[in-house]
Image: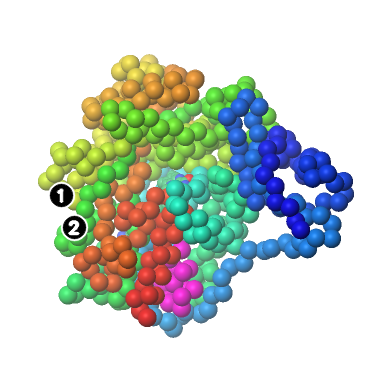
């Protein structure tokens, strides 16, 4: 019988097949030649001790024991070109995985995406980075693959439903992601690999009779007697269908405004907001691994930190080891930051959103906007950042200790944020209560992570698109909008996901609910 084993080994042993075989042969008291194959089921890093260890869960197959390499395959899709049509608005993870699931269920998805395909999108990312030009339909948040395409591609989620998570990870592997994502405790894909996977998903949707239309912005939703009839695009074209998955993400402000104007029920939702901090990766490695040099077998270290300050959580968000800070504005006249990493995470800098949880009461100054109060609060900070940093895509920046001491930094060294930075006292960007929490919070962080609070770390403002400022309420069982029949609010923009994996899971769920309703 193949043996399953939990073990702790050095990073070098974990990275070297021969050393690992040797180690295991001693553990189970057989000669290394007796071992036919080792399958790694789980891998995680234990950095709690000075001597860092790798936790592994493995299955050992000895010679003579039945072992077969398993290849992860795509589900069996059938042609749906003549099947009942379902409109999917948005080609982010929620929209794309909804479309795949619809095909699996024998329904035809018509995916409408305001942005360009992954290749066309690259030119617009260059324009925002180099020329400070923001294309309102094609940017880091909008375009094929959604907000996750040019990201770190972290694939972990707090979702408790492991079965759902595994299904999405396996689909990603079937579409070309490394099998490592099935094994790692904290898997990620990387900006350089995600676009090809997204492209392959789109091609599969088209191959089996679905439609994917780029540069097609939905500007109206047709509703009659509280039931969806279809949509209108920015060119005035109508597409009719009575089932619509609305997966437009957390940055589609025009969609929130449209729903509000049409009196389709939406509500303000708390989110989190703060700054993006950048340290050298070397410093983060030395803090996390308690060493001067991490060596060749350990990955660039991530970190995750949370503190309670004045009764609110302040925490790291979307940390990108070996990554770069990206300009993620979706309209001219605003500055927004976020981060990405290549698959090797081999840049010299480490960045993370450091955000404070907001409460609905924080949006009071914007109460006249009703359900859009949180969105307007968010917008006002992004616009202030743009104004204070010089009315380009430059971001307001401050050295970390200077920030805690309310001191304008005399200079800002070059950071990974390509559009550049302007030295600004961050207290000017944020409301007083937020600035105070962050000032105190960074000092607390410095106590938990020695070396973290340093003037070599640079804060960029703002990190503001952490989750949707609006919820589009739906029935918890049928997933249909509470008021409009046939409308399925989906993914992060509707307030039902936070991240690539949970958005993909929610996309699949909405498709399943539609199939159920059509039975
Ligand atoms: P989105 O991905 O936002 O997709 C919505 C799509 O709808 C967009 O493509 C948009 O163009 C389209 N759309 C909007 N309005 C319209 C309209 N009117 N008509 C037609 N189309 C429309 N998450 C992780 O889990 N791991 C990470 O490492 C990670 N890194 C990130 C890095 C960056 C730079 C950013 C911006 C986000 C990152 N995220 C990450 C968050 C993650 O990308 C989102 O949680 C996820 O993409 C949400 O999926 P979604 O499908 O719900 O929405």
Q: Residues within 10 Å of mark 2 (few under 14, many from 20)?
A: some
Using the rendered image of the protein, determine whether residue 392 is visible from the camera's viewpoint: no
Q: Magenta residues, as a range?
A: 97-112
Q: CA distance from mark 2 to mark 1?
A: 9 Å
The one of 159 and 389 positioned closer to us in this rendering: 159
Q: Is mark 2 within 8 Å of ligand 1?
A: no
Left or right of 259 in this view: 285: right
**Which coloring applies here?**
rainbow
Tell me the quadrant of the picture where the N terminus can be found. Answer: bottom right
Q: Position of residue 479 (x, y in %)?
A: 32, 65
Q: What element does badge 2 sit on? A: helix
- Return the mark for residue 260: 2
Q: Is residue 476 above or below residue 336?
A: below
Asked which quadrant contains residue 287, the reply is top right
* Residue 328 falls within the magenta-colored stretch: no
Q: How many discs appear? A: 2
Quadrant of the image containing the C terminus: bottom left
């Amino acid at each position: 019988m193949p043996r399953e084993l939990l073990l702790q080994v050095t990073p070098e042993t974990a990275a070297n097949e021969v050393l690992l075989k040797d180690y295991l042969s001693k553990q189970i008291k057989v000669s290394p030649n007796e071992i036919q194959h080792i399958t790694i089921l789980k891998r995680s890093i234990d950095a709690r001790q000075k001597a860092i260890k790798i936790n592994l869960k493995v299955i050992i197959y000895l010679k003579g024991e039945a072992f077969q390499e398993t290849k992860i395959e795509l589900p069996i899709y059938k042609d749906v070109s003549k099947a009942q049509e379902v409109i999917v608005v948005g080609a982010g993870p929620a929209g794309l995985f909804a479309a795949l699931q619809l095909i699996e269920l024998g329904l035809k998805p018509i995916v409408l995406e305001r942005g360009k395909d992954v290749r066309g999108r690259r030119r617009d990312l260059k324009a925002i980075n180099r020329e400070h030009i923001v294309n309102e339909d094609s940017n880091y948040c909008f375009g094929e693959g959604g907000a996750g395409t040019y990201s770190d591609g972290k694939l972990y989620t707090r979702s408790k439903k492991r079965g759902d998570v595994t299904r999405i990870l396996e689909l990603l592997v079937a579409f070309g992601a490394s099998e490592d994502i099935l094994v790692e405790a904290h898997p990620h894909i990387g900006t350089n690999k995600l676009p090809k996977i997204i492209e392959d998903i789109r091609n599969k949707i088209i191959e089996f009779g679905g439609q994917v239309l780029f540069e097609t912005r939905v500007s109206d939703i047709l509703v009659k007697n509280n039931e969806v009839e279809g949509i209108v695009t920015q060119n005035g074209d109508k597409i009719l269908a009575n089932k619509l998955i609305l997966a437009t993400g957390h940055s589609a402000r025009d969609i929130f405004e449209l729903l509000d104007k049409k009196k389709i029920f939406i509500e303000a939702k708390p989110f989190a907001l703060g700054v993006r901090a950048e340290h050298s990766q070397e410093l983060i490695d030395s803090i996390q691994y308690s060493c001067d040099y991490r060596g060749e077998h350990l990955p660039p270290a991530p970190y995750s930190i949370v503190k309670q300050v004045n009764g609110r959580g302040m925490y790291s968000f979307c940390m990108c080891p070996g990554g770069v800070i990206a300009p993620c504005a979706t309209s001219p006249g605003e500055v927004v930051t976020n981060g990405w990493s290549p698959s090797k995470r081999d840049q010299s800098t480490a960045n993370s959103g450091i955000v404070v949880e907001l409460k609905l009461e924080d949006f009071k100054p914007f109460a006249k906007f009703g359900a859009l109060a949180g969105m307007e609060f968010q917008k006002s900070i992004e616009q202030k950042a743009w104004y204070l940093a010089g009315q380009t895509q430059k971001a307001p920046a401050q050295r970390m200790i200077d920030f805690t001491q309310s001191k304008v930094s005399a200079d800002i060294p070059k950071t990974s944020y390509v559009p550049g930075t302007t030295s600004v006292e961050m207290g000017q960007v944020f409301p007083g209560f937020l600035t105070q929490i962050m000032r105190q919070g960074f000092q607390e962080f410095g106590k938990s992570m020695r070396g973290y609070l340093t003037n070599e770390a640079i804060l960029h403002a703002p990190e503001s698109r952490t989750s949707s400022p609006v919820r589009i309420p739906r029935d918890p069982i049928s997933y249909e909008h509470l008021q409009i029949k046939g409308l399925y609010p989906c993914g992060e923009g509707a307030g039902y996901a936070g991240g690539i994996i949970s958005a993909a899971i929610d996309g699949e769920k909405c498709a399943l609910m539609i199939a159920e309703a059509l039975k």
